[in-house]
Image (cartoon, helix red, strand yellow):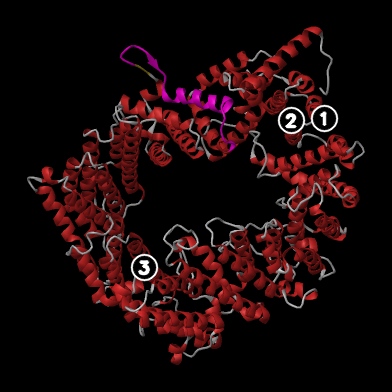
Amino acid sequence: MQGFTPTDADLAQLQSTMRTIELACSSIQMHINPGASESVILSLGQSSQPYKTCQFILENSQVPTAKFQAAAAIREAAIREWGFLSSDDKRGLISFCLCYVMQHASSPDGYVQAKVSSVASQLMKRGWLEFVAAEKETLFYQVNQAIVGIHGVDVQFAGIKFLESLVSEFSPSTSSAMSLPREFHEQCRRSLEQDYLKTFYRWTQEAASNVTNRIVESNSAVPEVKVCTAALDVMLQILNWDFRCNTSDAKLNLNVFSAGVRQDGDSPRRSECHLVQPGSNWRDVLILSGHVGWLLSLYAALRPKFSCEGYWLDCPIAVSARKLIVQFCSLTGTVFHSDDEKLHERHLLQLLSGIIEWVDPPDAVAKAIECGKSDSEMLDGCRALLAIANVTTPYVFDGLLKSMRPIGTLNFLTMLMSEVIKVLMTSNTEEETWSWEARDILLDTWAAILMPINTINVNALFPSEGIKAAANLFGFIVECELRMASASAFNDEGDSDYLHASVSAMDERLSSYALIARASIDVSIPFLLRLFSERVARLSQGRGIIDLTETMEELYSLLLIIGHVIADEGEGEMPLVPNAIQTQFVVDVAEADKHPVILLSSSIIKFAEQCLNPEMRESVFSPRLMESIIWFLARWSRTYLMSSDEIGEKILDSGHHHEHSSKKALLSFFGEHNQGKPVLDIIVRISLITLASYPGEKDLQGLTCYQLLHSLVQQKHICVHLVTLNSWHELATAFSTENTLISLDTTHQRCLAQTLVRSASGIRNSEASSQYVRNLMGHIATYILEMSSKSNFKSIAQQPNILHSVSCMLERLRGAASASEPRTQKAIYELGFSVMNPVLVLLEVYKHESAVVYLLLKYVVDWVDGQITYLEAQETAAIVNFCMRLLQLYSSHNIGKISLSLSSSLLSEAKTDKYRDLRALLQLLSSLCSKDMIDFSSDSIETQGTNISQVVYLGLHIITPLISMDLLKYPKLCHDYFSLLSHMLEVYPETLAQLNSEAFAHILGTLDFGLHHQDADVVSKCLRALQALASFHYKETGSGNIGLGAHAVGLKDSSGNFHEGLLSRFLRSLLQLLLFEDYSSDLISVAADALLPLILCEQGLYQRLANELIERQANPTLRSRLANALHTLTSANQLSSSLDRINYQRFRKNLSSFLIEVRGFLRTM
């Protein structure tokens, strides 16, 4: 198939087709009838065996885009028809593409060459598992001859670019879709890695080496440069490969370097660093060949040429060489495991000797960049240091530079980062300059060095010079941050990301600062205490005399830094005292008040307490400063306040008194029997002040509600003390009976209600706990009851103050409902029960206020969700009755109906409101479903005549008419709807038969919609629902029952038109999907599980559909293959007519093989 001699008739047809494709391509470029032109181009790839036509176009067309489309058509058709192409045809197509690329290597249309090369790579991969070794060798021989350079520089370049395309195709992250199982791609990847990847590396290495002298000896760019650049790119690509075939090396002992290899999940990283671990069989080509020395010499020879014609710092060959050098810094693992233990160290030392020139001296390099020199070499030098830090221990890392400089690498890292930060602070720009990126990379380098020792004794793994370097760097960083904070105090622009970032936005940077501080914690804590004390003293002395804005900004930054240094975030878990603080301070419990961390913490708490004084609050404690105080108290309290970690109490008995005396002193000082309760009281009083005395400060109040108070009630041992505090009862009183907190944002009201109710877990007596909730929330129920009972409520309901009050009360109810737990469940049920009728009144009155309707629905969802599993039969019946009334009322008022007369913006808003409402109602039905799965009640709900499945289907019947196909385009609503529908059809398939024809038709319509959805998860849910329905019907009818009844066999409508049954309908639809439409290969197994019972239920229809497929196939050979494949689908692997697990597994294998066999040629029919 490499070439052919057409007859005159063939030639005329080929030329006609070529002109048609050329015209279509030109029309698209000129935007003339693009739809029709696109159809013409698509038809080429969709036609049966278009290879001769495509080859003719590639060899004869003068329109590059037409040649590009011809190559794409070869790929599309060959992948689709691969199953029935002969071996010669397959090899011929690959050879044609390779020959074309080599023969047209000098063509100016590079994108056409790249496309044909890509097609060759994809076809080679498609046949990879079929071709024997000799066939592969024959194909690769052509490639190798090109790469050697015997056919010239252009062909050499083309050969290398083909290898780049091939490696990319075999790499899972960049491979093309071929509608084949993942196992195929994995087998290809493994085979290439084991048998060819190293060979490809050697080919490109030799090609680059052979042209080096020509490049080095020339004072201007030569053609060989592009060959060398391409070869360097392929070598980099191969080193980026995800090596997995070095398992034989896994049993070797790890050396000091491997111990330093880490990929920390909790590291505050911003820069990527890919570790290269190819295994010991790569040692000869990567380490022992002198390859690194050649690469460094090449770049060293290029550097003086950057002023010559054709060369500059960012020219392609320079960039590629630097990237490869940096990647070599990441080389680690068993590739170094040999008798020579210093092999890895010498490798890194050799690299560092070349890299250090890129970044040293730091001040001169930074100055040159500021004067206009490119920053790329500097940034690559930083990346190289990061890579080295990832594969060594701190001691080895520090010692590398000492052999060539009077200082260690850690000291140099400090100098480099100090210079970068200095430039960053000086430039003071909102744009992310090179200094931003360099700072982030160097912070990641420190993190790579310090993260492993953050959980071990610092002195054991960190050299003393490194500790001093870290202390100096941290001091410099803090001083710079404070200068920046001070300078920002009067910045009116207020939009600088660096100066005015929120706490969360700065968290990554501050976490890295904290690691550096903890490496020298015995210096850092006293330093921070001194800085904090100086600023507080300055506030005290200058209050009412001078402008303190600068000092307050410095305190803001200082509190954030201190918080990160002395405590971890612990998101999702309760954080422990940082290891450095545990091990670096030796303080006896009797002298705990002298512990540096306690001194620092106490100073901050004492300072924060001053905000309780109205005069101090007025003059000193700005909302921004209070934000940092609240944030600090929240973070600090999770670690130190009344800690539940009891290890401190056992230290003396465990023989580790010296190691853990610091931790014991810290935890006991702020423990429940010492200063813990007074500090807790201060924190609560400060919280009340932020909520009551800073109106309109949403960020501050949000931090108080969501972080500080929320974190306190998450710990039950703190709740025990919390509920005994007068300050806590003052907060509860202000919330429940006063109007002090009514001005809070409604979402903050919800969080505060949840927090206050959750604190009831600290009351050990169950009845007292319930009474606490009644006292706290009783007035809200009374308010809603009284408001809904007013005779003039409808006339006053729209008044702003009434609307706000109702919204606040609903949010509070929702917060309390979401805090339900066994001890308070009864009280919260009573609370909800008392407002059931008022809630329906509110829904009636506020039916046109979408925000209030949504609040109502979300409250009911949270209340039902928290209660349903605990309720007895009578209570369940009451809730179910209430939910049905709610659904009917929502539907009867046509809430959610959208007027087509609305403007586009209002229409979009109306759809969004409806989407939110319907999603809440679906969540409500899902909560009711849970009663059948989890039920802690003492009697059965059936005793009250309540059938959950019927209730939920009734609910679906009520709301499904409101769920249009447009609304199902909202991903979350779609997911919730099909999750509920799938669950219902899987658990209660028999109830589907009881639906009326309208509701039944709507559900089938949405199932059909979901079956063709672009989200694979939605399709999977629909397939599982179909499996449940079909298997239920099959098993029931097998037992002599009616199963799905008339819904399964089909019905005639009032007009006499016959509608086929759901099983017949979905058998057709599923076969159409599997054979002719696009879908994820991950769905094949779940599709097989749905298809098997559908076939068993509708065997007659399946046979007719199979016969139709066979009859439509005109090619006798393909017709025979299709008939055999259809027979094998239902008979191979001892497939039976049962629906047990083993039979499902057999059918999955059958369907996968069937689709691979026939899908390609069926799509050309």
Mark 1 highlights which residue? 104
Residue 593 located within the stretch drawn in magenta:
no
CA gap between label 2 and label 3 equals 61 Å
Identify the amino acid type marked 1: His
Question: Which stretch did the figure color magenta?
Answer: 1053-1081
Sequence-first tag of 2 and 1: 1
Residue in the image at 49% along x and 63% along y: 506
Q: Rate crowding at label 3 as few (under 14), some (14 to 19) or many (20 or more) other CA atoms within 10 Å.
A: many
Residue for point 58% across, 22% down: 31
Relative height, residue 355 to residue 944 (above, below): below
Apparent side of residue 422 relative to residue 881 in the rendered image (left or right): right
Residue in the foreground of this view, choosing between 818 and 362? 362
Q: In the image, is residue 753 above or below residue 150?
A: below
Q: Is residue 400 left or right of residue 979?
A: right
User: Which residue position holds label 2?
Assistant: 112
Q: Residue at (62%, 35%) from the top-left corner?
A: 1149
- Disc 3: which residue: 708
* Local SS, label 2: helix
**Residue 363 or residue 668, whichever sits in front:** 363
Tell me the element at label 3: helix
